[in-house]
Image: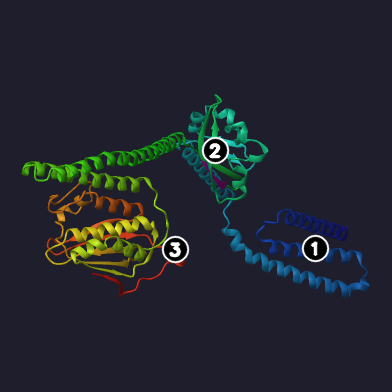
Amino acid sequence: MLEGISVESGLVAWMAWIVLAVSLATFLIQRKDFPFRVAGSLVLAAAIACTGVGLAGYLLPASLARALQISGAVAAVLCWLAVAAVWRVIPKALALPNLSRMNELLQGEIRERQRANERSRLVVELAPYPIVMANQNGRIVQVNAQTEQCFGHPRSALVGQSVDVLLPPRLRDGQTRDPFGACAAARDPGGRTVKDLFGLREDGSEFPIEIGVQAVVTDRDVLVLIAIVDVTQQKNTEAALKKLADELQRSNGDLAQFAYVASHDLKEPLRKVSSFCQLLKDRYRGQLDADGNRYIDYAVDGSHRMSALITALLELAHINSRTASSSPVDSGAACRGAIDNLSSAIEDSGADVRCGELPTVLGDEGQLTQLFQNLIGNALKFRGPQPPVVTVDAVREENGIWRFGVHDNGIGIDPAQHQRVFQIFQRLHTREKYPGTGIGLSICQRIVERHGGRIWIESTPGRGTTFYFTLPPAPVHAERQPAREAVCHVH
């Protein structure tokens, strides 16, 4: 009877081993993330081996005892391997937090995510411009109060709608699908900016907008953040500035036309006045007293000065109204052309004018010739007791800009007057001592500024003056370097 009970107990134990093996195998199959899979697999193998050896001892005949011994040895090895594996993972298993600790950690992570979501919601809600959050299919999931205020829709009516509901119908056709770029931004997290769009308010009115689109990648989804800026005021300002610029351009054109016509209309009567005054002087020479002759001389001189002034004003208006061309110009040729124009004045004054080889710059050849002519002519006029010596050179600055210098040994200019001399009609000397219109240096300043440069003076009274001005370089393929040796020497 005891033997029967022993047999039955063994069968029950083996059945328990089988159930244990099946349960462990099911667990390992379903929980692929189990951190101790190696140890579990060895325990499973040992359970299967022990179960197999036990059943074989009852089911196989005694003649196969040798095979049973080998199977038992294999089962024993697997059991000890399982014991070793379990022994190694026990410290790691003990280090794992218990269920209550894991639950606390999980709850803490949930609370932190909730706080992060609330912070994100507040950032969006408190933004000073409309913010729309859409999913990767372009459906609105969140808007802020500024969106409601700007577009006039309650947020409950916007959530779940396509972002295109905020655009006029003409921007929703097949040619401009996804104009907000929500779907494109979801595929390309780099972000993008879209301009020249129009928003549609609830009342049907449109207004210009610009948007910035940026993908926001979360653990569960890809969202698209759309920042919308109402640029109505900016567009109105641009339109007003354009209108003002157009009116200014038209006014300048009218002023230039007026100056041109007025100069011709005024010169004709001045020529007649001057001619008749000269006829009176010639015809009645010797018949008038000294006062009469002096009065006629005043009239002739005044008409000549008025004619010169009108000519200078016409030149100034012409420079202001004409756009300077931007082509490579040999500034040395422009300087030599100015010297040729001043050949009579140079000969009369006994001047020594030196022009080195100057660089090729970007500008208008006619205006640069006039610039050199005015500056060299200024040096010839305001000379000291010695014959004038005028030198023109150029030095390249670190930023690539050419700095020109026109140096003379004339009477010089008081530093307090350096800015005044560029103002129109400003004279530092009497007309009797140094004749002129007082416009020449104003013309020089306008020419330099229209070429993108600047002009300034360095001078010491009684020791000469240097007029410096800058001009942009010509493109590399058209540029040549200036030589150090002077190539133009005029007496």
Is residue 220 visible from the viewing direction of this image?
A: no
x and y, in percent, of residue 299 in the image: 16, 42
Q: Using the image as rendered, state which of residue 3 and residue 452 is in the foreground.
A: 452
Q: Residue at x 56, y 47 (%)?
A: 215
| Residue highlighted by disc 2 | 197
Q: Residue at x 54, y 38 (%)?
A: 197
Q: Amino acid at mark 1?
A: Ile
> Between disc 1 and disc 3, whose residue precedes?
1
Q: Amino acid at mark 3?
A: Pro
| Magenta-tinted stretch | 211-216
**Which numbered circle lies on residue 475?**
3
| Residue highlighted by disc 1 | 48
> Between disc 1 and disc 2, whose residue precedes?
1
Crowding near the residue tagged with mark 2, few <14, some 14–19, many ≥20 C-alpha atoms within 10 Å: some
Q: Secondary structure at mark 2?
A: strand
Up-down relation of residue 106 to residue 368 (above or below): above
Q: Nearer the viewer, mark 1 or mark 2?
A: 2
Q: Using the image as rendered, state which of residue 121 and residue 347 is in the foreground.
A: 347
